[in-house]
Amino acid sequence: MLTVKNISTVHGKIQALWDVSIEAEEGEIVALVGANGAGKTTLLDTISGTYTPVAGSVEFQGQRIDGKSAAYIVEQGISHVPQGGRLFSDMTVRENLEMGAYSRHAWKQRTETIEHVCQIFPRLKERETQITSTLSGGEKQMVAIGRGLMSRPKLCIFDEPSYGLSPKAVMEIFQVIKSLPKQGITVLLVEQNVGQALEMANRAYVLENGRITLQGIACDLLVNDYVRKAYLGL
Amino acid sequence: MKDKTKKYSLFAGFIVILLLLISLPSYASSYRVIFVTNILMYVILTLSWVIFSGPTGYISLATAAFFGIGVYTSAILSNALFLPLVIFIGGLASFCLAFVVGSLTLRLRGMYFTMFTFALVQLISNLAHWYEVNVTGTVGRLVLSLESTTVYYSMLVVFCLVLLASYYIKHSRFGLALQSIGESEEAAAHSGINVTLVKVTTFAISAFFMGAVGAVMTMRWTYVDPPTAFDIRLSFMPLLMAIFGGMGNLFSPIIGSSIFAYLEEILTTKFPYYYMLLFGGAMLLVIVFMPHGIEGVFQKLQKINKRESVEKT
Amino acid sequence: MKILDVQGLKKNFGGLAATANVNFNIEQGEIVGLIGPNGAGKTTLFNLISGAITPDSGVITFKGKDIAGLKPYRICRVGIARTFQSVKIFAKMSVFNHVIIGYLFGDHKHKTSGTSSEEAEKILDFVGLSGMSDRRAADLTLVNQKRLEVARALATQPELLLLDEVMAGLNPTEVSEAMELVRKIREKGITVIMIEHVMKAIMTICDRVIVLHHGEKLAEGKPGDITRNKSVIEVYLGDFACLPSKT
């Protein structure tokens, strides 16, 4: 479904990605782990169109998407939930969710989709008319994830979805993410909660200093010595 | 090392220009001297404006109010007192007004602050007008104007003072506090900085120089009235000049405002009927092709330079 | 010695009780964890203590002095420092200047710029940012920006440090490093209150834990007791099996 081939991305003055290749097949959950500053967010931003790679290609369902605008990429079916949420802070929860369904085909189904999202996150239903700048950090994260689902994507990219969430909320989010492939949504997940991310994912990649250093079946990486020492603190 | 030699050469260049300016009346015509006086007025207003609005990001449109206070102070006192004192009191009056107004309004953020400062100009202007109509019975007042050379040198002195103030503020603890307020007021407050005091004091310092320059400018005129003293264009011009020049360092606003003011003088004299049109057109071109002002253009050139030297090695 | 005492603290935001009658106290030298579901009012509590917002009613006493309603810069100078949930650094400023600002303005004792450079370097070494003094804060990674916030707070010579989710977004190895830093801070004699969702940290380094829910104190006690508390599990922890062991 998603093929990233040998991309290199320059971010400001620094080369953030060097010859990176990853793949996500339909219905998979692919995890991307690595230290802060390794380039994970840059990789996600390159896929969703914020950055254009200086080398390599990004293909989605057989079409080239590198260099295309972020809006075009959303129309193609990729949704990106950025790190920290980046909500429209002066708009209400409902308005933020609606904005997630901005693309043509999602807009028609937005009422249904909002119902569905509110089932997943009942707190959002409670706070529907509240301005998002007044929400707590974790609640904002829930709105961000909800908004990402509103575009009815085929591929959903999550950048640190557990950031700032209570343990219970993290479990709920991860349950949601685990259930997405059943709904026909492929998942690309960046997480600092390395253990849980590897438990959920089918396959995973380790990104270090802008390069892929390890890849494989998630369970294998979970028992890999290097991963355990460097990322699981064991 | 390259940075230091660049700094020294800039400084040396500046000293040369200063010497040229000091000796101007001896080799230039009276018209030229007045011309340069006008340009200096705009340069000082821009520098004063940048002192506050640059680092904090609070866009003030009150410049005309503070300038006008200086004008009126000078108009009222000019016969009675020694010249430097008049200029100082003009600045001081604006300083006090800014301090009071700032204490009340610097809680307003963004657009609200800007609108308030704009309203302040109208308020003070109308107050002056009301006073003249109802109290003194005449609109406007006559002033004793002075020789163009005296005015010129007074302007030069204020210019040097505002430069020193700008430099000192930028390189002091106070300047550091100001910078931090511009980046994050909340974090600055929690680091022990009395944010309100710093903002209000800087606003007042900036107003001081605007008032001083107003006091000097009055000596060129024979008659002042509220519309002349509180001309709203004097609020917008420094802002445009600062954007045009850039606000990153001391030189950018000076270069920006000099070019801008020079352009305005030339256009008003050569095309008195079309100058607004040409001016607007020039502004559009600037915004489209140089969105970061002159400073932005220089930075781009520096980048290209660096890239070339890296490619060569 | 009680360093912080909070009694009857209340704060409403347009009808919503963000803080509803909270009472607790903190002993000098403790590391206290503050946990609770999202929206429980944890950051609001920090905002009330640090002076960012003023309480509707209640008393906050720091070292015997009433500080409720004081402006943030005064509370900073009195000896309370904090970090922010969404990192608030001075983006275009150098790392070095961040610490200098904290040092020059954060303490009531008047400082000269003479010793400030040495002190600043010491603090940067302490938090693990040695060698990065000249970098622009905006160019740092998130972890380092968080370290910088801590450095800036430490430069104000606090006796009480409030850490707001300083470990969010850190991988397990980075969390261990952060825990070590908090321990070192306590060894310097600074009392710490930390809002955290990273249970590993709460369990390992906190002496006591306070749990907030809907603006009220739900529970208080040792980490082990809190994690066995039924209401806390139901409201905050979720599946008990998810908790990491103490090692």
Image (cartoon, rainbow, N blue to C red):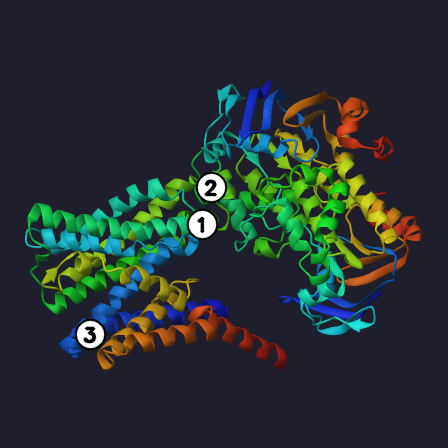
At 39% from the left and 72% from the top, the residue drawn is: B9
| Label 3 CA crowd tier, 10 Å (few <14, some 14–19, many 20+) | some
Subunit ID for the residue under disc 1: B
Gap in angstroms between the C-alphas marked 1 and 2: 10 Å
Pinpoint residue B4: horizontal percent, then vertical percent: 46, 67
Kindly indicate whether the residues beneath marks 2 and 3 are on one polypeptide chain.
Answer: no
Gap in angstroms between the C-alphas marked 1 and 3: 37 Å
Count numbered badges in the picture.
Answer: 3
Quadrant location of residue B13? Answer: bottom left
Task: Return the disc, 1 or 3, that comes first in the chain's sequence.
Answer: 3
Amino acid carrying label 3: it is Leu
Front residue of A179/A86: it is: A179
Pinpoint residue B14: horizontal percent, then vertical percent: 33, 70
Which residue is identified by label 3?
Answer: B24
Q: Secondary structure at mark 3?
A: helix
Amino acid carrying label 2: it is Leu
Which residue is identified by label 2?
Answer: C104
Pinpoint residue A199: horizontal percent, then vertical percent: 88, 47
Classify the position of the C terminus of chain B by image quarter.
bottom right
Q: Secondary structure at mark 2?
A: helix
Pinpoint residue C228: horizontal percent, then vertical percent: 81, 23
Label drawn at residue B119 = none
Label drawn at residue B176 = 1
